[in-house]
Image (spheres, helix red, strand yellow):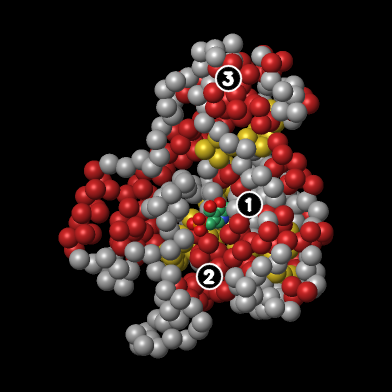
Amino acid sequence: MLALFGGPPVRTRPFPAWPVFGTAEEERLIATLRSGLWGRLDGRQVEEFERRFAAMHGCRHGVAVVNGTASLRIALLAAGLRAEDEVIVPPYTFLSTASAVVESNAIPVFADIDLDTFNLDPVAVRAAITPRTRAIVPVHFAGLPADMTALQAIAVEDRLTIVEDAAHAHGASYRGRPAGSLGVMASFSFQSSKNLTSGEGGIVITSDDDLAAACRSIQNCGRVEGGLWYEHHVISGNYRLGEFQGAILNCQLDRLEEQTAARDANGAYLAECLGSVPGVHPQRRTSDCTRHAYHLFMVRLDAAEFGASRNAVVRALEAEGIPCSTGYGFPLPDQPLFRNKAFGPYLPDARQRLDYASVRCPVSDLVCAQSIWLEHPLLLGTRDDMDDVVRAFGKIHRERGRLEAR
Ligand SMILES: Cc1ncc(COP(=O)(O)O)c(C=O)c1O
């Protein structure tokens, strides 16, 4: 019997906890504490992390900042966006992908996603281009690299800047190249839920010297290399990451490779097993994806094919001991922020002509209605742990008749 109705659950043991840490983190933190060098301008932890993280991506520069929202905005500002330029973003993503555009005084234009990969659909991107378009921000959603070959072709043709939103994609690769090295700049987040974390944090990486200098300046109150302390060149802020976070990130980076390999293998196994359950459609891994970061393991559940509603299945999974959620309730353009164009001081003129209520993104609507998210710590478990997930889906499908269908 389903655990939801009092039967024994498939699983009572917890899945691996997140974050993972040990004596390495403790020692670096204490050493940083005792050094008295707690700020970015004093110590060497953040600098070391920037160097290592950029090198891991084959990039020349890394600029660490306070979070992955600031890193997106800084990258867009460094790209030279001007008021009312347009930036193409997906509707199925976290708020920041689009809010960072508004905070750069530019207009987010939503292009729909692909039903199988949940990443930007290049056909929709092409259709969204206007003479004002300046940039594309592809999100490597859930850790699956976006269709960069097609997006790059569009970017070259229309002279657009690609800023990768790689907040989910630490350790992912595309045709053997690291996600985050595929555009002109890339932004990562180190917020607590992310695959590489220091509680809060973010970084911009790039191989372009000028863009890196621009990002570093915006991050550091508009100061410039070789300039005076009290010499501020551009509108900017203090977005510097602190040394305690740098210390944690250096240790977490040592763990990333092994964790990514485990997530990739377990995610691929789950996708293969669950793909045979009627109505369960795991995110499709394209042949270009040479490593999936699996920040999320995502499936689309088609209620008609499965025989029970997505929400009922999520409730049943949770009762069976499989932590999961339904993800975003609706696409980003439906947020009150966009519906009401509550942009504060930004886009004062453009907002008259913007109408986010008329944005159509049917695939994103469907994915919001059908998605089930399993978070990455679960994928750090053993093959037995994965088999519990498979068993739970199988059990729920067999007993679906007792669940509500819609
Ligand atoms: C796709 C995406 N982009 C950007 C961000 C922003 O990162 P942060 O929370 O560090 O500001 C997130 C974080 O949740 C995200 O999921």
Q: Secondary structure at mark 1?
A: loop
Mark 1 to mark 2: distance in Å?
19 Å
Nearer mark to the viewer, of 3 and 2: 3
Which residue in the protein does label 3 denote? 4
Q: Secondary structure at mark 3?
A: helix
- Residue 74: numbered disc: 2
Which x, y percent locates residue 117? Answer: 68, 42
Rendering quadrant holding ligand 1: bottom right
Residue density around tag 2, few if under 14, some if 14–19, many if 20 or more, within 10 Å: many
Q: Is residue 138 above or below residue 348?
A: above
Q: Nearer the viewer, residue 138 or 365?
A: 365
Mark 1 to mark 3: distance in Å?
31 Å
Q: Amino acid at mark 1?
A: Thr
Q: Secondary structure at mark 2?
A: helix
Residue ID at (75%, 45%):
365
Viewer can see residue 267:
yes
Instruction: Say which label, 3 or 2, has the lower sequence index.
Output: 3
Instruction: Say which label, 1 or 2, has the lower sequence index.
Output: 2
Ligand 1 neighbours mark 1 (CB distance < 8 Å): yes
- Residue 404: numbered disc: none
Residue ID at (66%, 62%):
337
Instruction: Say which label, 1 or 3, has the lower sequence index.
Output: 3
- Residue 93: numbered disc: 1
Nearer mark to the viewer, of 1 and 3: 3
Which x, y percent locates residue 145? Answer: 61, 48
Q: Is residue 37 above or below residue 18?
A: below
Q: Amino acid at mark 2?
A: Ile
Which x, y percent locates residue 259? Answer: 42, 39
Q: Nearer the viewer, residue 325 or 215?
A: 325
| Left or right side of 173 for 26 | left
